[in-house]
Image (cartoon, helix red, strand yellow):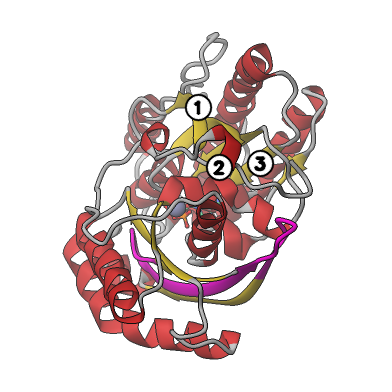
């Protein structure tokens, strides 16, 4: 089956077409992403109203480009999937309403996809990753460790109690006078900094739960920066390296705890899957490899274009749900908040019989 996907929950306007074959394997036929980064850069973060307006202006052309690149038309696709949340509600309304219009006019089914579920299922689009696996979702809006047990079947093992991990990178970059988005800037500064120079806290280390907290770390960076102001180039590089080392230590510890929780309830995971923009950080990837090895599993990180926000993952989640017989009515509401556990589950007997699970 061929599915058109639409993503507008944050600052990327994206549309993509994917195919799901009867054996459960997938193929990306097109994947078009228009980033609004430049429009938000001056504000040091995403401005919801600007994002929503930019989605309205761009979405029609982005969808047309995705269909054309895939060699498809509204008549040839089998379903339309849109991210219906969680996210910035103005943008979510734009994408979901557009998908509803397409479904209404063409008569094809609508699938309202949870954006987090799409991140969670994305590794299955590019390879055989059977259920159950452990997902580490690390983006600007989310920090979660999730047991992915099947389509629609997710158990959150850990989450952040305050800032998201990417948000911690972005806020640290901002207070050091670096650009937005902050993660890549902090990573490149950290490469030539001394990670041992500043003693920063490692919040939540050693706890039996798998939760995160980053606000104390961010505050510690701010206090240190104020203490030694004005900051030289070397100070900034050392602060970035010290911050990144603290985050990396926290990620290693919290994921080890998360994998233990996974093991206790569901046995061995088939893989540790990392997704979200922060998963592209090389220091974090290194530590994820080590954590996976220690837990006797493998690390799967989808390619960067599937890790950061995109519509191929939305189309794919739509296809996986459709294969389970799950579609949505045209009056379904967009949601700013939508915990993964609240997505509708297929009855057990309707899970797709794919080759790998
Ligand atoms: O998944 P994503 O593109 O969008 C959502 O937030 O959903 O993630 C963006 C986040 C931003 O906070 C950005 O600073 C962070 O991912 N990020 C990074 C890196 N690249 C992007 N954080 C650390 N190191 C990076 N190399
Ligand atoms: Zn995302």
Q: Please say whether residue 284 is visible from this viewpoint.
A: yes
Please report the bounds of the magenta region as a residue range.
7-27
**Circle 3: element type:** strand
Compute the Cα span from label 3 to label 1: 15 Å
Dot 2 or dot 3: first in sequence order is 2
Q: Which mark is residue 26?
A: none
Q: Which mark is residue 155?
A: 1
- The residue that mark 2 highlights is 151
Pick the quarter of the image with the N terminus.
bottom right
- The residue that mark 3 highlights is 273
Dot 3 or dot 1: first in sequence order is 1
- Report if residue 18 lies within the magenta region: yes
Eyeballing the image, is 162 above or below 303? above
Q: Please say whether residue 43 is visible from this viewpoint.
A: no
Q: Nearer the viewer, mark 2 or mark 3?
A: 2
Place of residue 332 in the rendered image (x, y in percent of width and height, measured from the top left):
25, 54
Place of residue 335 in the rendered image (x, y in percent of width and height, measured from the top left):
25, 48
Residue nearest the viewer, comparing 112 with 60? 112
In the image, taking residue 147 as reference, residue 100 lies left or right, namely left
Compute the Cα span from label 2 to label 1: 12 Å
Query: Is disc 2 in contact with disc 3, using a CB cutoff of under 8 Å?
Result: no
Place of residue 103 in the rendered image (x, y in percent of width and height, measured from the top left):
34, 73
Place of residue 178 in the rendered image (x, y in percent of width and height, measured from the top left):
41, 57
Compute the Cα span from label 2 to label 3: 15 Å
Eyeballing the image, is 267 above or below 299? above
């Amino acid at each position: 089956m061929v599915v058109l996907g639409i993503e507008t929950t944050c600052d990327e306007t994206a549309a993509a077409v994917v195919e799901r074959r009867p054996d459960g394997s997938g193929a990306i036929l097109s994947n078009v992403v228009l980033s609004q980064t430049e429009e938000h850069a001056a504000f040091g973060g995403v401005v919801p109203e600007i994002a929503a307006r930019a989605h309205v202006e761009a979405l029609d052309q982005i969808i047309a480009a995705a269909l054309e690149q895939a060699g498809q038309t509204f008549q040839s696709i089998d379903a339309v999937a849109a991210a219906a949340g969680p996210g910035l509600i103005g943008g979510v309304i734009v994408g979901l309403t557009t998908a509803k219009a397409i479904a209404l006019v063409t008569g094809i089914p609508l699938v309202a996809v949870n954006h987090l579920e799409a991140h969670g299922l994305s590794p299955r689009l590019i390879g055989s990753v059977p259920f159950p696996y452990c997902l580490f979702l690390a983006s600007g809006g989310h920090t979660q460790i999730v047991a992915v047990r099947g389509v629609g079947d997710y158990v959150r093992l850990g989450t952040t109690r305050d800032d998201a991990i990417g948000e911690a990178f972005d806020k640290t970059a901002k207070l050091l006078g670096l650009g937005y988005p902050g993660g890549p800037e902090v990573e490149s500064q950290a490469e030539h900094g001394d990670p041992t120079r500043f003693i920063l806290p490692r919040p939540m280390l050693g706890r039996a739960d798998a939760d995160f907290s980053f606000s104390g770390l961010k505050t510690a960076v701010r206090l240190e920066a104020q203490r030694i102001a004005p900051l030289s180039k070397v100070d900034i590089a050392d602060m970035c390296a010290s911050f990144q080392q603290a985050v990396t230590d926290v990620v290693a510890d919290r994921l080890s705890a998360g994998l233990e929780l996974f093991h206790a309830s569901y046995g061995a995971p088939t893989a540790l899957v990392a997704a979200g923009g922060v998963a592209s950080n090389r220091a974090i990837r290194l530590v994820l490899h080590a954590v996976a090895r220690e837990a006797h599993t493998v690390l799967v990180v989808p390619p960067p274009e599937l890790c950061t926000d995109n519509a191929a993952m939305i189309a794919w989640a739509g296809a996986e749900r459709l294969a389970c017989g799950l579609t949505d009515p045209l009056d379904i509401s967009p949601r700013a908040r939508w915990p993964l556990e609240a997505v509708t589950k297929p009855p057990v007997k309707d899970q797709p019989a794919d080759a790998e699970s």
